[in-house]
Amino acid sequence: MSLSFEGRVVLVTGAGGGLGREYALAFAERGASVVVNDLGADTKGGGKSSAAADKVVEEIRAKGGNAVANYDSVEDGEKLIQTALDAFGRLDVVVNNAGILRDRSFARTSDLDWDLIQRVHLRGSFLVTRAAWNHMKTQKFGRIIMTASAAGIYGNFGQANYSAAKLGLLGLANTLAIEGSKYNIHCNTIAPVAGSRLTETIMPPDLVASLKSEYVAPLVLWLCHDQCQENGGLFEVGAGWIGKLRWERSQGRTVRQKDQPMNVEAVRDQWDKICDFTDATKPSSVQESLSSMVAVLSQVESEEGVDANPTAAVASTSGINPAMAVGQKMEATTFSFTHTQCILYALGVGMSTKDPDHLRFLYEGDPDFSCLPTFGVIPSQAAMMNLASIPGLNIDFTQVLHGEQYLELYKPLPTSGELTSQATIADVLDKGSGALILLDVSTYSDGELLCFNQFSVFVVGAGGFGGKRSSDKAKVAASPPQRAPDAVVIDSTTRDQAALYRLSGDWNPLHIDPSFAAMGGFKAPILHGLCSFGFAARHVLKHFADNDPSRFKAIKVRFVKPVLPGQSLQTEMWKEGNRIHIQCKVKETDAVVLSGAYVDLHPASDESPESLSQASSSTILHFPMIRFCPGLQSELVFAEIGRRVKDLGSELVKKVNAVFGWEITKDGKTMAQWTIDLKNGSGCVHEGPFSGKTDVTLTVSDEDFMEVVQGKLNPQKAFFSGKLKVRGNIMLSQKLEVILKDHAKL
Ligand code: NAI
């Protein structure tokens, strides 16, 4: 779909000619109302004329577009904005483009040459943008362009004044990008190349003619469109080519030693290393830039002179020192919980009462109420947050990615209690582009090991410290078999999935705060990786383990791409013995989000491990099975009721007049069905479902059924505690007492 600017108001400064004119025409052509500002000065800033702006306005109007002229200097910033508000009532986009040149070799640059250039370019852009800022802030939308120049980025003979102003604009833009992001105000900088009256004196005429302004305008329009989330970027553009620039920093060298003054000779001796761009990093924030220096402070203090040890010296600049970190134990953490946290977590990973099978994870009164196995990550997640406290791991948290997760349960999780977690740095690997930290967390209940987690934490830009690349401690991902999946489940996340999931304890604003997400380069807050992980795990549990948490053994997942709340997750599953391989995609985009993933199951109690491993892929879908089970105690009761009904049938039919269906369960599975028909003929009791529609169906476990008939458990109490479930006409179940009370003596 083509990009429209319908409803948007755009101010282009210096739009009476050259690049600015091209922008104004292009915005207007796509529906924007445009303020065409131009002082009508000559290239050196002299003179004044309304003709330039008027001509462009006329051009726009002739094509049916909407435009007004403004003839003020950009140094009168407020007036330009007022023109936009008077004419169109709002302002969405400011393109700071007006410019002049006063080229002189540096020695001959006069005060005026200097000041005029700073006033038009840097001060002018500041004044116009400041006047627009509050309008943009209030409307929570704004797009700003600063126009820099290759002369500023690289330097250019005879343009000291101009270079200074142009790179000043980049500094201004960098900070506006940070301050504006939470108001959806984005500020980007371009360094264009185009033939214009400014360049005709320095370029040959054919180049001036062929480097057309129309090869620059589309980038400006894109950066100003509401679909574009770019913020704080710097682009070179010309001739139809566009490239992005960023800072690069060498690994550097610490030239200071503990308790010794820093000296110039050390700088000289390390000069090659300081300037060596091998494995250069790309810091993108002040925090990132500073963090490695802060790391050096503690490194120098704790080391016996880094110079003597080159590995340590490099480690200190990346903030990672494996020799120090590996094997470190963190302080144990405790986690207290009740059924509330279990239910909140189940909702967080998308469980819903829409699916009756989910009730056992959502309702504490359910007879089989359980905790989802993947809840096992929750008690241990605090360890991730404490990583930075480990000596030798001076990491920048804005660069931390959760790469992989492994969870193994040694017994089903309780639904309440107090758990203690003990975290250890199992290994630290050097992956070049970053450091990979393996964080092992063991969680105990009453001193007994309940579960084990391994977090694989990737720190972008912290590699290159000379460490090993792989580890035998790593729980490795596994690829799925090369065939179509045996089962596929599509499940939608809700718009509020991340808002709900974070209540389980991962409070990272990246998952809720749009401006925070924007800083991380995401167009919207993203779902927690461990939330998608929870979705995938429960898909496996339902399809291959009858939702039985005791069957769950372990899960491994690699987080590949983020999921946006509201997108649908498509879990593809392959059964290979006790291992269910998984791949998870976003259905809407087909992007793989979880890869190399698997769940290991314990064989079902009625299945031998062999039968499981030999099971063909056609047996993958487990529906609740009704099996004849000679061991049920309730059988005797139904047989007895059958005899009574035979004796008193017609009398009971008159009194009760209803058909009761029974489902008797054991260990959460329906093991028998019975029908007590006290409606038709003289009544009967038989095993199996009723052929027509029952008036009421009761589901109860074999044990609870016995408790009820023996009078040990009041039926109402059984109902309210969730032990007895009733579907259909609930009032009729009251009449059951008529039948059951006679059996209290059983
Ligand atoms: P241009 O001279 O064709 O356009 C600049 C316009 O700004 C003129 O119409 C002029 O009247 C107007 N202007 C000057 N002072 C003003 C003021 N105080 N208030 C309002 N308007 C004023 O030049 P061109 O090439 O289109 O340049 C546009 C921008 O791009 C400038 O900021 C320039 O420094 C920058 N640039 C251009 C390059 C190129 O290759 N053309 C290279 C690098 C940067």
Image (tube, rainbow, N blue to C red):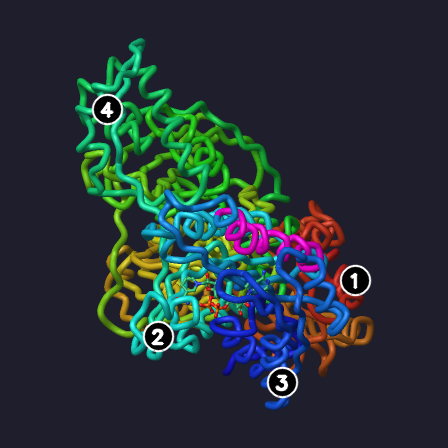
* Residue 42 x, y percent position in the rendering: 52, 67
In contact (CB < 8 Å): disc 3 and disc 4: no
Asked if the residue under mark 4 is in contact with the one under mark 1, i.e. CB atoms within 8 Å, the reply is no
- The residue lying at 59 percent from left, 37 percent from top is 337
Q: Label 2, secondary structure: give it.
A: helix
Earlier in the chain: of badge 1 and badge 2, it is: 2
Front-most of residues 489 and 56: 56
Q: Which residue is mark 2?
A: 208
Q: Position of residue 325 (x, y in %)?
A: 31, 26
Left or right: 148 in relation to 311: right
- Judge whether residue 715 is colored magenta: no
Q: Nearer the viewer, mark 3 or mark 1?
A: 3
Front label number (1 vs 2): 2
**Res 537 visible:** no
**CA distance for labels 3 and 4:** 62 Å
- The residue singled out by tag 4 in the image is 267
Amino acid type, label 2: Val
Residue at 56% over, 59% down: 351
Is there a contact, CB below 8 Å, between mark 1 and mark 2? no
Query: What residue is pinned by disc 1?
Result: 734
Find the distance from the CA under tag 2 to the CA under tag 3: 25 Å
